[in-house]
Image: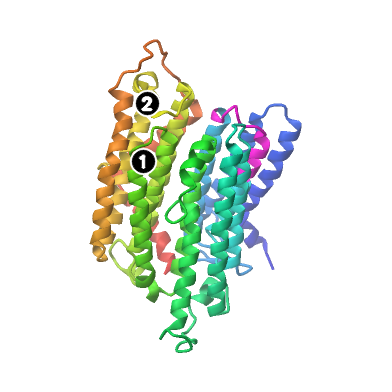
Amino acid sequence: MINLNDILLLSPEITLVIGTFVVIIVDLFSPKKSYSAIFTSIFLAISSILAIAMVSNLISYNDASGLSIINVLSIDKYSLFLKSLILVSGLSISVCGINLLSEELKSKGEFWALFLVSITGMSLLTSVTEMITAWVALELTSLPVIGMLALNQRKYSLEVSLKYLILSATSSAIILMGIAYIYGVSGSTFFNEISTIETSLSGKYLFKDSTNILLLFGALLLVSGASFKIASFPFFSWVPDVYQGAPTIVTIYLSVVSKIAGFSIIIRILFDAINSSMISEWAIYLAIMAAVSMTFGNVMALRQSNIKRLFAYSTIAHAGYILVGLASSEPDGLNSGNLAGIQATVFYLVAYAITNLTAFLSILSISREINSFDIEEYKGVGIRARYQSIILAISLISLLGIPATIGFMGKAFIFTSAISNNLMWLALLGILNSVISAYYYIRIIKLMFIDSSEDQTSKTANSDLNTRIITSFGAVLIIVIGLAPVMLLGIVESVVNLLQ
């Protein structure tokens, strides 16, 4: 039975659901369509405050180490931390969307209502401790995105939406197949029961330890299906077309928020549901996913002329970097004094969210002024939109991994973890890919500040105030945490330790 304490723990999600209905009602009766984005931002702000207050113990609840709600959700510091990251990222997007949302977008009220529904699913995804509930939460994140893509008035919006729908359905089917395998072996869909099963089927099949083989196969199916959410191998073919064709607000949402939610459930499955003694078996699969994603993403980004498409391939590459951390985890990694792979993964996930969100919001602001996403049109933008160009340059330097940025510290932790866990080849491949990425990141900076624009009569552009404030804060975090990573690292270690 759900009590008042359970309602408190679910208050961020309850707030978002209430906000969804309010946004729909406001859109029905208000002639000013910007109200939808304003109310979306208000409810996201309330939800973010509640999540941050709980993770920082400003709001107390019964069991700080983890409390199960009707046995399918667990609210602990790990889920609350990633939930806060998701909600704050969503809030940043909605605040900037008040003024920067494309005029070509139709039905803004429906768009923001779907936005809140999707974020509700992603928020729940960080807390699930049961397979079917996880699948429902995944669907709750994906289905609204299909509608958000279709609401664009451009002629290819339905094509983009259909492509996302087909691949989303395929990944969902693969996830269900993985759940079926795991349930068939363990007789349960609850993470804590799956991780403690004995090898009761040992010797009944061709394998000496058939239970572990089937569990491993089911886990690999789950991770493969979830790769759709994190935009990594094998389900990354949709990313370039959808990122380019979607409204930029949706592109930012998929690039940042969706990736956080996707990795949160992958970490839950691998470290809560699957026995830690099997890490060496599935780690090699994650290493292959990481290697292919990094290499494919960076090589394909070299030849792009559209900045949204370039960042689509860039996000595939960064999914590969994050997977390096998961592949580098040891069975006792969570208990060791050194930086474990899982800790490096969460640190890099936060670094990527801050950096990519700042970069994409700057791109949205600049491209709105020059009315183009063509990279060649960025020539001389450093003069016309100097402030946002500087912030974009800082973000690009962090994505590249230059010292004194949060991106550099994230890659340093990731590659160090790989080397310490005998994955030298994967660390070297990651460093090589970082060198490759230098070409297309530095090329954008060169176009903005060194090359001159053909249009010499262009006036200086003024970016939206909301975007300027948020991107400025992001740029400060990039530098400050890059210089003093211990601030974030301490939080990450305390959060990750709850997964052991």
Horizontal and vertical percent position of residue 237: 46, 49
SS class of the residue under badge 1? helix
Q: Where is residue 32 in the image (x, y as percent from the top left)?
A: 68, 27
Q: Is residue 263 above or below residue 483?
A: below
Residue at label 1? 301
Indicate the position of residue 481 as horizontal and vertical percent values.
Answer: 33, 44
Q: Which residue is the site of mark 2?
A: 376
Q: For the residue marked with disc 2, what is the amino acid?
A: Glu
Instruction: Give me the residue at 43% from left, 53% from top.
Output: 232
Q: Residue at the spot x=25%, y=49% of the render?
A: 432
First to last magenta residue range: 100-116
Is 105 magenta? The answer is: yes
Measured along the vertical axis of the image, is residue 252 above or below residue 137? above
Residue at image position (34%, 59%) is 325
Left of 498 or right of it: where is 330? Answer: left
Residue 245 placement, left or right of 353: right
- SS class, disc 2: helix
Type of the residue with mark 1: Ala
Q: Where is residue 306 in the image (x, y as percent from the top left)?
A: 42, 33
In the image, residue 247 lies in the stretch drawn in magenta: no
